[in-house]
Image (tube, rainbow, N blue to C red):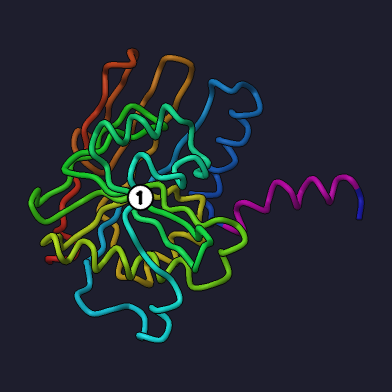
Amino acid sequence: MTAFQTMLQTVASPFREFGPVVGLLYAIDRVLSRLSVHLRLYAYEFGVQPIFVKPLLPASMRRQLAIREIKGDDPEIALMPVRPEVIAQRLRRNATCLGAFREASFVGYMWLCGPTYDEDEVRCTYSVSPVDQAVFDFDFYLFPEHRLGLGFAALWDGANEFLTRRGVRYTFSRMTRFNLATLRAHHRLGWRPVGRAIFLRAWQLELMCATLFPYLHLSLRKDNRVRLNLRSSAIEG
């Protein structure tokens, strides 16, 4: 294979994987990020999924992993690949962390909060509704050695049980449109899209274009955050 053919394959690869629109967004982001660490293009999809009352897994599989809440002083906090100041901020905002365990092994975790969540990649705050029946889930993480097992389904099974006891019916989340595997996995759990947004970041400037109100937003300061309201109409309808 010639150098030219190799280059063509590299250029065409994201378009084959993501399709023409998302492939173009991915290519733009890759070019921008190579030019400067202060240049990025974020392509998000927002969705909602129902909280199932019935278990997602049979009893024999549910017994293989234990799901429990992780508190701020638990040793598992230090094992998370998240900056300490970010963890501290989540705890100050009373976010809840659920962890999955197989005997003594820490399999993975997820965070939950509501009724609002401040995005940590761009200047955006998500507001979920109905307030008393919805939460926002984020930072779903499985440690690499557990990604081929039951971790994903078991953690969601435990989260459903945890949230059902608290009267929660919906959970919202933000996905990058470049992570097809995660999108497909959530769709299998009943996840439905409620909106999309693209953020262009160039040093202090952030420009948003979204399918949700206010549709367009320009931010030049760190304290100027846009708010996107996420509603459960995709499932209720």
Q: Residue at image x 24%, y 28%?
A: 226
**Quarter containing the C terminus:** bottom left
Q: Is residue 198 above or below residue 20?
A: above
Query: Which residue is denoted by mark 1 in the rendering?
Result: 70
Q: Residue at x 28, y 16 (%)?
A: 223
Left or right of 20 on screen, residue 220? left
Residue 212 appears left or right of 196: left
Circle 1 SS class: strand
In this orientation, which residue lies closer to the viewer: 151 or 204? 151
The quadrant where residue 159 appears: bottom left
Residue at image point 25% right, 58% down? 48
Q: Judge by depth and name the residue closer to the eye, 209 or 231.
A: 231
Above or below residue 93? Residue 14 is below
Report the number of numbered marks.
1
Where residue 153 appears, as percent x and y from the top left, is 41, 71
Which region of the structure is painted magenta? 3-17
Q: Residue 179: x percent and y percent?
A: 51, 53
Name the side, left or right, on which 132 lies relative to 121: left
* Residue 144 percent location from the top left of the image: 60, 57
Determine if the magenta segment contains residue 63. no
Question: Does residue 180 appear anywhere in the picture?
Answer: no
The amino acid on which the numbered mark 1 sits, given as a three-letter code, is Ile
Rendered location of residue 207, percent (x, y): 36, 25
Q: Nearer the viewer, residue 180 or 150?
A: 150
Say above or below: 59 vs 28. Answer: below
Q: Main secondary structure of the magenta part?
A: helix
Q: Quadrant of the N terminus?
A: bottom right
